Image: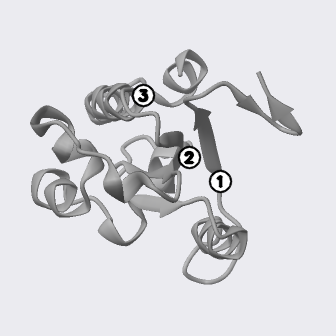
Amino acid sequence: MAEILTRFGAPGQQRTALASVLQSAVAAASRYSSAKRVLVWGSYVTSKAEPADLDYSIIVAVDHSQTEVDAADRKYLVPFEARKHFGADTGFLIIRDYPLEYYVERLDFMCRRHDGKPRGIVEISLRGEIAGGSQ
């Protein structure tokens, strides 16, 4: 998280405000064992001086729908609430990591711009997962 805030969280009022939202969203997601990773994409993870918004998705375990989300966290973790509060893209706010084909399809879509060209995406691990295993 510190690396992301250093790289993308400043300068500028908009970047600072979006960094605060991202920190709150990551903190909220971290409270639930069914949340595994946060993906950040869109204009926030570019060199654009004033990104339009913050696009993020929470990668969750397949049983996440059984998780009761506290009222204070709903604006970050429940698609309808996120849309109402932040205008978040609810189609990709919550992404199940299984079945694997579903996850790969969604991830591939998010990694491409509307014209099909690749775009940047940043991953924040909430559970200490690393490639090829876990910590």
What amino acid type should be assigned to the residue bearing mark 1? Gly
Separation of residues labelled 3 and 2 (CA atoms): 25 Å
Callout 3 touching callout 2 (CB < 8 Å): no
| Residue at 55% in and 27% down | 4
What amino acid type should be assigned to the residue bearing mark 2? Thr
| Residue at 36% in and 48% down | 54
- Camera-side residue of 9 and 2: 2
3 or 2: tag closer to the N-terminus: 3
- Camera-side residue of 35 and 7: 35
Foreground tag (1 vs 2): 1
Quarter holding the C terminus? top right
Residue 32 horizontal/vertical position (percent): 39, 33
Q: How has the structure been colored for display?
A: one colour
- Camera-side residue of 99 and 50: 99
The dot on residue 120 is 1
Q: For mark 3, does the 10 Å Cα neighbourhood hold few (<14), some (14 to 19), or many (20 or more) residues?
A: some
What amino acid type should be assigned to the residue bearing mark 3? Ser
3 or 1: tag closer to the N-terminus: 3
| Residue at 53% in and 22% down | 1
Residue 60 horizontal/vertical position (percent): 50, 51
Residue that label 3 marks? 30
Residue 115 horizontal/vertical position (percent): 61, 83
Callout 1 touching callout 2 (CB < 8 Å): yes
Label 1: element kind? loop
Q: For mark 2, does the 10 Å Cα neighbourhood hold few (<14), some (14 to 19), or many (20 or more) residues?
A: some
| Residue at 36% in and 25% down | 27
- Taking the image as shown, residue 120 lies to the left or right of residue 76, namely right
The dot on residue 46 is 2
- Taking the image as shown, residue 74 lies to the left or right of residue 15, namely left
